[in-house]
Image (cartoon, rainbow, N blue to C red):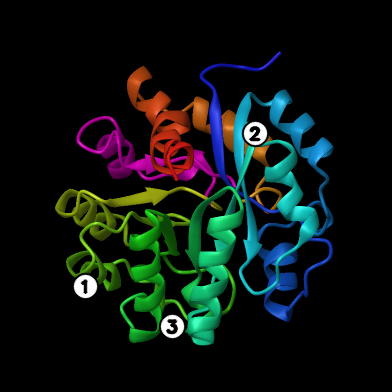
Amino acid sequence: MSQSPPVIDTFVNVNMGSIERPEWLTRVAEDYFDRSQAIFQDISAEQLLETMDENGVDKAIITMRALEPDDRILAFASKHPQRFSLSISCDPRQGMKSVRALRQLASDHRVSLARLVPFMTNVAANEAACYPLFAACCDLDLAISVNTGIPGPPAPGMVQHPMHLDEVCLFFPELKLVMAHGADPWWAEAIRLMLKYKNLYLMTSAYAPKYLPDNLLQFMNSRGRDKIIFASDHPVLGMDRCAAEARALALKPEALSAYLYGNAQRLFFDPLEVR
């Protein structure tokens, strides 16, 4: 029987068994998370739904690359529209190819957000290459996440400093922008930026909830109740572990409900009904 409150998991991978495995990814799986066997697997919709039901997860957002559309992944959202939507990972170095692919996928499928991963491209969010993608998201009323914090892999970290988003929020005030994978060690900067910009949020993907810092929990219990969004990065971090640890956090009931479900529903799923 599932526990309450219900959960939306906003970062789930279902093709880790078949994607290309660069050396850094293998190192992270083996040395950082110590669970490579669990990580490198392809997951079917039926398997994922079973995991979700066991852990009280109502909906999930499945990640796919913009320039590598995968019919198997697209079918998650098309066959189970009440349970799944998509996030589209974009490479800003590909210029208008990425922009056009994102627009087409958002037009044809249940897409909840785009994603940028600066450590993989060594392109910071405030660089010119990212701005066409931000503009497209504004036009589409589509949220976009940008990884922040020092990454686990041996890859550039400064490109993921939250302060790069200061310029982006100023230039695109209507853009719904989400810091992904936490913001360690720059939590204070991330919180200050969220206080400054009404459309800036943070997603705790790939960060075990029991290790979330006290200043973030205090923020969630007060002025930041509507700002922080649950995610696991399943199967890199297990959905079961993250959901259980999140429910055990020292949060007020209304703050916990917003973190686990309400903020994601408002930001990622409500717009699908009017798009």
Q: Nearer the viewer, residue 186 or 53?
A: 53
Check disc 3 and report the residue beneath it: 123
- The span from disc 3 to disc 1 (Cα, nearest Å) is 15 Å
* First of labels 3, 1 by sequence position: 3
Q: In the rendered view, does 33 fall on the left or right side of 220?
A: right
Q: CA distance from mark 2 to mark 3?
A: 33 Å
Per the image, the residue denoted by label 1 is: 167
Q: Residues within 10 Å of mark 1 (few under 14, many from 20)?
A: few
| Dot label at residue 220 | none
In this rendering, the label closer to the viewer, 2 or 3: 2
Helix, strand or loop at mark 3: loop
Disc 2 + disc 3, Cβ < 8 Å: no
Q: Is residue 231 magenta?
A: yes
Contact check, label 2 and label 1, Cβ < 8 Å: no
Lateral position of residue 13 relative to residue 129, left or right: right
Q: Is residue 197 above or below residue 57?
A: below
**Residue at 80 percent of width and 51 percent of height:** 38
What range is drawn magenta here?
207-232
